[in-house]
Image: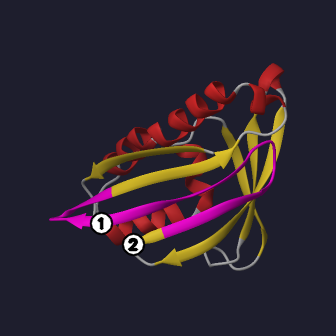
Amino acid sequence: MAIAEYDVVIHRDAMSVYDFLLDARNLPSWRDGVRGVELVSGATGAKGAVYRQSLAAPAGRTECCDVEITEARPGAEIRFTVLAGPERTRGGYYLSTEGTSTRVRFALEGEARGLLARLSSRFRRRMRAEVGQLDQLKAVLEQEPEL
């Protein structure tokens, strides 16, 4: 089992950060490799909603993965699990208020499967790189004008 976590403080209120994260269509703006996202089933941003993500793959290919929201607590937490795709991970975004800012922790856990099972150090590095993209989320959100 591989686990990766990372956190940043974003100079925005918790509900603004939560709403941005809950709208999966925002993923391509801050997650490298996410080409597109579409709602497959359920209500947008609600527990049980399933999204299909188009991901950049080696050799210019595109892979898809289906991600289900398993928990959505406004202003506090969004948890998800990957139902189908090249990697089966689960994780979440955990928010806490710090004055007028929000600390966001992105955590992932999963087991390498197939070829990645033999390359577990590569799998762990990829997970660390994924959670490290919170710096890009911070940059995107802090560039937007506050409402």
Quadrant, the C terminus? bottom left
Where is residue 62 drawn, in percent x and y?
82, 35
**Do callouts 1 and 2 mark residues in contact (Cβ within 8 Å)?**
yes
Identify the residue at image location x=76%, y=31%: 116
Q: Regarding mark 1 in the picture, which secondary structure is present there?
A: strand
| Residue 12 sits in quarter | bottom left
Q: How many marks?
A: 2
**Circle 2: is it few (<14), some (14-19), or many (20+) Cα within 10 Å?**
some
The stretch in magenta equals 78-103
| Residue 17 sits in quarter | bottom left
Identify the residue at image location x=56%, y=41%: 31
| Residue 45 sits in quarter | bottom right
The dot on residue 96 is: 1
Identify the residue at image location x=33%, y=45%: 143
Where is residue 92 drawn, in percent x and y?
52, 60
| Most common SS among magenta residues | strand
Q: Which residue is mark 2?
A: 76
